[in-house]
Image (cartoon, grey):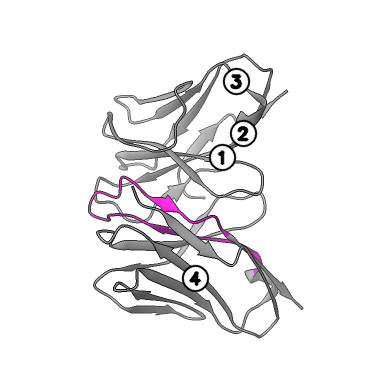
Amino acid sequence: DSGVTQTPKHLITATGQRVTLRCSPRSGDLSVYWYQQSLDQGLQFLIQYYNGEERAKGNILERFSAQQFPDLHSELNLSSLELGDSALYFCASTSGPSGNEQFFGPGTRLTVL
Amino acid sequence: GENVEQHPSTLSVQEGDSAVIKCTYSDSASNYFPWYKQELGKRPQLIIDIRSNVGEKKDQRIAVTLNKTAKHFSLHITETQPEDSAVYFCAASLGYNNNDMRFGAGTRLTVKP
């Protein structure tokens, strides 16, 4: 157990819908990263937050957004869902902007029908 | 931004043999290079990492080498065991900010008993 939690574990929804994925970092970690992993694919970096502020953006679609709250948990919002958005979404946390090892949560498996 | 390429995409070895996975990166400013192992249906977990001020690092049967001039780094697993079977990801980041971790596409390693 990495100490990073993600909810829900599984999510099934329809095209055009909107969902919110939640991540709680390890105690004391200020940075949260979001990744998308499609079937048999690598990890695509989406976005990073540090202490409530957006720090870096990767290949995140405009239909996706995220935020980090004062208690440091983060939410990833996916809207106007398409079939191709079906994937495993991981969040990871590190202790700070100069953190090293990223600790991954168990992931949320999103299925868009 | 950083671009990481990883080879091979699949690797099959006999138990007891060695396995080598290679990665190249594009941003010469990158100075932190972790390797993650992801077992089927599980989260990625760090197995070893190296910084640019070190050329080689070893941890039991696992070693990583880094050639900063050529911008490539490699994972070496000796005396492979069936439980080493997994997908391995390399990554590169600027390290001090760690806010743009880019992952390779992954290598599916199969160790045959």
The earlier-in-sequence mark between 3 and 1 is 3
Q: Nearer the viewer, residue A55 or B113?
A: A55
Q: Pointer 4: what residue?
A: B22
Instruction: In this rendered view, identify the residue nearer to me: B61 or B6.
Output: B6
Q: Which chain hosts label 2?
A: A
The residue to which callout 1 is attached is A107
**Front in this rendered view, residue B20 or A105:** B20
| Circles 4 and 2 on the same chain | no
Asked where in the image residue B51 lies, by quadrant, the reply is bottom left
Residues tagged by mark 3 and mark 1 found on one chain of the structure: yes
Q: Are marks 2 and 3 in contact (CB under 8 Å)?
A: no
Residues at discs 4 and 2 in contact (Cβ within 8 Å) = no
Mark 4 nearby-residue class (10 Å; few <14, some 14–19, many ≥20): some
- Picture layout, residue A104 above or below residue A53: below
Specify the amino acid type for callout 1: Gly
Q: Earlier in the sequence, mark 2 or mark 1?
A: 2
Give residue A9's mark.
2
Same-chain check, marks 2 and 1: yes
The spot of residue B67 in percent (x, y) is 34, 75
The boundaries of the magenta stretch are B85-106
Residue in the image at 51% along x and 63% along y: B6
Chain containing the residue with disc 1: A
